[in-house]
Image (spheres, rainbow, N blue to C red):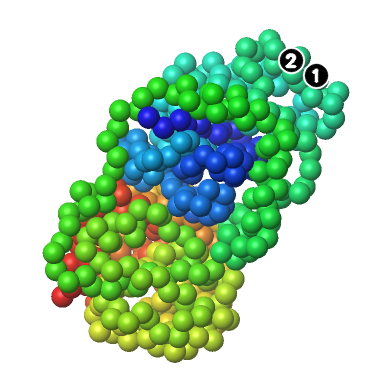
Amino acid sequence: MVARLVIAAPASGSGKTTVATGLMAAFTSAGLTVSPHKAGPDYIDPGYHALATGRPGRNLDAYLCGTELIAPLFAHGAAGCDLAVVEGVMGLYDGAAGAGELASTAQIAKLLRAPVVLVVDASSQSRSVAALVHGFASWDPQVRIGGVILNKVASDRHEELLREALEESGVPVLGVLRRIQRAATPSRHLGLVPVAERRADALASVDAMAELVREGCDLEALLGLARSAPSLGAEPWEAGAACGLTTSAPPVVAVAGGPAFTFSYAEHPELLTAAGADVVTFDPLRDEQLPDGTSGLVIGGGFPEVYAPELSANEALRKAVAGLAASGAPIAAECAGLLYLARSLDGAPMCGVLDAEARMSERLTLGYREAVAVSDSALAAAGTRLNGHEFHRTVVEPAAGPAPAWGMHRPERRVEGFVQQGVHASYLHTHWASQPGMALRFVERCTR
């Protein structure tokens, strides 16, 4: 059994990331082994969680992976740990649009049988905070709100008024954080700036979050609440069991990393390794060649639009990627990878693998998607159905090639992406734990 807490809030912007990351760092510095988790599809927050704990930040997304995998994936990540902290997504009861509680923080808390700590932005209220907390605590009897952390409290008098009001709610106050900026982290068009782009400053931010939490929160009470969680009774997910081990010589699968390609789920390289691959990370900003012996290439999401001039200047690597694609080798590209394979991005030459142009857009595309594979590819057989997620502020024209990658069925019907030779390129982010056969299929194609 792993002690565990879910950090939630009434709405986005209340301070979940600050509190969750600060708790992870504070408990880690106190000598506990802390397992970090993030509800939902977000790639950026887990980078800060990993920095705080020294362990991979892992996502728990019931839409992408299915409810049946949440507890096993949690048990896999938290194995051998003293404490697990799960940062929620949006407001506590907000989930996939039009799908009830699916993918909400509340659903994750119920699936994990974990107590919830509600982080409340108290900057513009006093006694009303009790009504707000009472409403959240009573909305779903299966969600156990074990305490409140008050954020952006203005003064001692303000704190006194809030505490008096909350005495009537029966939910204990486990922390009070003042209005200060020392733990702030910079943001841009898709949220926080990833750790890989500001590691030294990110370390300072995480240290500031930890200090803020140590000063303002009752860590002993929070740990006691976490230890009150009942036994979960879930068998840990295993990558090897999920996709089957192979005995052939391991093909080298190169995975793009570095500041331009930071979006990746921790289970993906685990699945590729379990399927028999030798996974090697490289940085398209710095490395002029693919890793020796590369048989397949995975290019995940990130921010190539921020680094377009530098990526374009690395002509040697762009030619190497184009050559690998021309050979028919498997290439799986998601979102940022799609842009990198295009002819150009905001006018800067890219790899030229796809007959498409990419550019920044004023419109944010964000949300869960129901998809079906339109064309046979190195990732999926035609007809494969899965759930994915889109998150970008760019446009690729045309949106789909002669052989599209996916057909979308929710929230709109359309085709998108490109399948050509061994290339599968699309805006759709997918979580392979829900479809371990994708990793196995990809590695098998790499051995041919």
Q: Are marks 1 and 2 in contact (CB under 8 Å)?
A: yes
Residue at horizontal 49 percent and vertical 41 percent from the top: 34
Q: Position of residue 262 (x, y in %)?
A: 49, 63
The answer to whether 241 appears left or right of 268 in the picture is left
Q: Quadrant of residue 212?
A: top right
The answer to which of 394 and 171 lies nearer the viewer is 171
Q: Is any atom of residue 409 visible in this view?
A: no
Residue drawn at (51%, 80%) of the image: 286
Which corner quadrant holds the N terminus?
top left
Residue type of the residue flagged with mark 2: Ala
Residue 265 in percent (x, y) is at 41, 55
Residue, far front = 31
Q: Which mark is residue 165?
A: 2
Work out whether 242 lies above or below 85: below
* The furthest residue to the top: 168
**What residue type is disc 1 on?**
Leu
Name the residue tied to disc 1.
Answer: 161
Q: Identify the residue shown where x is 42% and y is 52%.
A: 389
